[in-house]
Image (cartoon, helix red, strand yellow):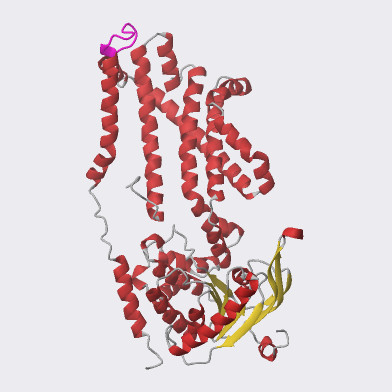
Amino acid sequence: MATDPRLDETRAGAAVQITEVSKTFGRGDTALVALDRISLSVAPGEFVCLIGASGCGKSTLLNLVAGLDAPSSGEVSTGGRRVTLMFQESALFPWLTAAKNVEMPMRASGVPKAERRERVTELLDLVQLSSFGDKRPHQLSGGMRQRVALARALAQDADVLLMDEPFGALDAMTRDLLHEVLEGIWRRQQLSILFVTHEVREAVRLGDRVVLLSSRPGRVIGEFGVDFERPRGMDSADTVGLAIKIKDRLREEIVRHGR
Amino acid sequence: MAVETPQEPTAALAGLDQLELAVPQQAKRHVAARVWAAAWPKLLALVLALAIWQLIYLSGFKSAILPGPATTLTDLWHQLHTAQLWSGIGTTLRRAVIGFALALVLGTVVGALVSRIKPLRAAVGSLITALQTLPSIVWVPFAIILFGANTTAILFVIVMTAAPAIANGLIAGADFLPPLLLRAGKTMGLRRVSLYRHVIMPATLPAFVSGLKQGWAFGWHGLIAAEIVVIILGQPSLGVLLSNDQDQADMAGAISIILVILVIGIVVDMLFNLINGRIRRRWGVADAASA
């Protein structure tokens, strides 16, 4: 993979550049190699979906990019860009209203109060929750909570958005709508997105590129460019066609583990 | 199909949101109705207790010593018209508040340190729990030898009994802090002090409040125990009044004081429950228990 010419091309200006990164947990006999010499880049404004079976270290990789953990070897660079992370669970603070949750990252970075108010209104509007600002997380549905979480992530004014199976727990209808919302925001704000999912069609629906990870240890084992026109449907022939190809490749990988 | 179609998801999302929230909200009951709902089980318990007491009295058990409810409540009524009882209540409550405030500070500081510093946790974590199992009365001789028979000794007993429970509440809260919330806080750039203020403190609040409630109960035990032993001249307290009744073998008087202590305990417990219920409702964990 290291000799892939496309990688060299994007390296200079990549929004996220992961170079030969390995991550090992523990030591000696019980050591677990979560990631093994992974190289991956996300160009500015690119939407990259990361897919893999369980145990491929997807979440570990996002933690490294978000700076919440350090790699055992190799290098992660975001070129000084601000990075934000969104989880499968909304991780909203239950003691705050939706609006206060969205406001929190701005309080953390010392944005003046008046400006914060204005931004909160804007962001809630962006995720179409203007009238729900004073609701507490437990009063909102799962999909609404994820939209608040998205608004909160955007409140960090980041250039890079890392998403860890953010729609994994939602029903299909809500998820499809949130795909449209996310795609719209991504386009307008020219975000770079690294989106982890285990749902192959979701990856094809959203990504400019779909990157496949192997399991235990996590390695990049394949990459698929998605070049058909947006907005794509989850159930369109193009999406399903490519998804079948990717699934076959994934299956090979899983079968290899069964031997 | 046009490339820009922002209207369509908007309408569909709004529709979904309305469907999700179309659950009928429980109507807010009138204050009086809520007070009554909270009060009647307690009143029923009170009536039952009085009935049992009256039955024991009628059975003639130790009838020379044990007064019936009527005699006792009359005695209590008379005592409520004396300055002595009110001055006693005042002294005891003042000590309770000061002692509890000191325990709050000490317990919070110790709890915060122990929950954050791992070696300290290993060293004194179980000691704090052990302290909590210690009967409050054992501190009384210790405090009298250390400080003499004075108010300081009494306050010391309150602190030693209440602080461990408060510290433990904080430690338990930190133990059950969801790692995901911490991760979310760190992701948005909250560090150290701000992480404490915006994530750790509010997240541990429910456990902290239950620690306070428990600390109050333990401290109250210790306070009355200490007051019965430490008698300061010219300063009547509930403990002293109880002790006087013991000396004079005045059972009606003793039961009256016990009732006063009981009522104060119940009222404070209700206050804590009020705070607890409010937090639980805010968090959305309020269930049938606190509704």
Residue extending farthest to the front is A259
The reply to whether residue B231 is visible in this rendering is no
Which one is nearer the viewer's eye here, B281 or A177? A177
The reply to whether the magenta stretch includes residue B227 is no
Does residue A86 appear in the picture of this structure?
yes
Residue B268, percent across and down? Answer: 39, 35
Q: Nearer the viewer, residue A177 or A130?
A: A177
Q: Position of residue A179 (x, y in %)?
A: 44, 79
Please tell me which residue is depicted at 71% across the width and 72% down the height of the picture. A22
* Vertical relation: A51 (above or below) B195: below
Q: Is residue A68 above or below residue B275?
A: below
Residue A247, horizontal then vertical, whole percent: 54, 80
Query: Which residue, as the protein is rendered here, is positioned at the far top?
Result: B64
Report the magenta residues as a range: B57-67
Q: Quadrant of residue B189?
A: bottom right
**Does the stretch in magenta take in B59?**
yes
Q: Is residue A56 left or right of residue A150?
A: right
The residue nearer to you, when weighing B119 against A236, is: A236
Q: Position of residue B277 (x, y in %)?
A: 38, 47
Q: Is residue A19 above or below residue B145?
A: below
A186 horizontally vs B29: left or right: right
Where on the picture, by quarter, is residue B145?
A: top right
Report the magenta stretch's main SS: loop
Image point (47%, 63%), residue name: A92
Q: Quadrant of the N terminus of chain B?
A: bottom left
Identify the residue at image location x=32%, y=47%. B291
Q: Nearer the viewer, residue A34 or B96?
A: A34
The quadrant in which residue B43 appears is top left
- Does B60 sit left or right of A232 as displayed? left
Q: Is residue B4 left or right of residue A245?
A: left
